[in-house]
Amino acid sequence: MTILSRGALAALTLLAAVALTGCAKKADDLTQPVAPAKPDVGNDATVSMWRSQYEQHKQQWHDTFKSEGSPLPEGQRVGSEEPRFYPYAPEWRLVGDLQRLPAQKFDRMPATRGKTQDYLEYGRIPVAANGDTVTLMVYRPLEHPDQFFIPFRDATSGDETYGGGRYAHLDSMDVHRWVLDFNNAYNPYCAYDSVWICPLPPAENTLPFPVRAGMLAPKGHS
């Protein structure tokens, strides 16, 4: 009997899920080019709800920094400075379609400390702002195949935000409607402690414009 490692099982499971999704959507070609994601439109009550959710999101991060799952070394958790964030920016809650790749493949993404991590290159989502349009690669982690992961840098990286880039996730509303909310962008754990191994954003996921939403750089770091 051949015993597969957990990573190998995850890879097979993810590929099987992708294959099944392709069969289920055979009549609907999901690999066609799509229009750039645009700011979501909401009335005053909806924007107020989004802002309230953002405050809850920030509080969850504050709690995480003091918990066992904190990115900080154990001795620094009590009385430590809490993570810092931009004010809520509804214009950075974007909605658009996700273009799946016709030939998906596993990518060994460079990470900190000279390591690599395996991800599935799943699709692309174009984003437009300040007259520029950039198409971001969307990945699915082997260890968390339910996630749609976007490591990115932008014009604030190394200044207002962490120089190593930030992470964002896509949320699916339906087959052709996805939310990319940069207000939820967060720093990799290695921004707070170098013992962590964190994937590095690929060059193609560099936005030429500033994204002033989400988590700021740790104080004293950029």
Image (cartoon, helix red, strand yellow):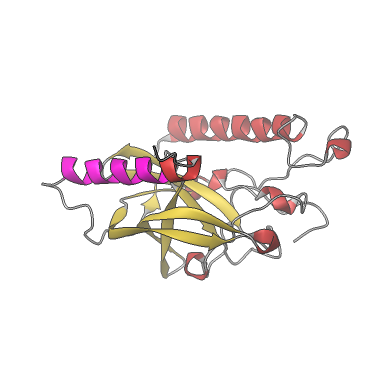
- Location of residue 66 (image quadrant): top right
- Depicted 27 relative to depicted 68: above or below: below
Horizontal side of 70 relative to 102 (left or right) equals right
The residue lying toward the viewer, choosing from 189 and 44, is 189
Residue 35 in view in this figure: no
Residue 159 appears at what percent x and percent y?
A: 71, 64
Residue at 48% x, 44% y is 7
Q: Is residue 133 left or right of residue 167?
A: left
Magenta highlight on residue 14: yes
Q: How many marks?
A: 0
Q: Give the image quarter of residue 106.
A: bottom left
Quarter of the figure with the C terminus: bottom right
Q: Position of residue 50 (x, y in %)?
A: 50, 34
Q: Residue at x 87, y 39 (%)?
A: 76
Depth check: give the residue in front, 155 or 74.
74
Q: Is residue 157 above or below residue 46?
A: below
Q: Nearer the viewer, residue 42 or 15?
A: 15
Q: Is residue 132 visible?
A: yes
Q: Residue furthest left?
A: 27
**Would residue 125 be counted in the magenta stretch?**
no
Percent across and percent down for residue 25 are 17, 44
Q: Specify whether 200 is left or right of 136.
A: right
- Main SS of residues in magenta: helix
Could you tell me which quadrant the N terminus lies in?
top left
Place of residue 35 in the rendered image (x, y in percent of width and height, measured from the top left): 28, 59
What range of the chain is rendered magenta? 11-25
Q: Residue at x 73, y 36 (%)?
A: 70
> Please, which residue is most extreme toward the front here?
1
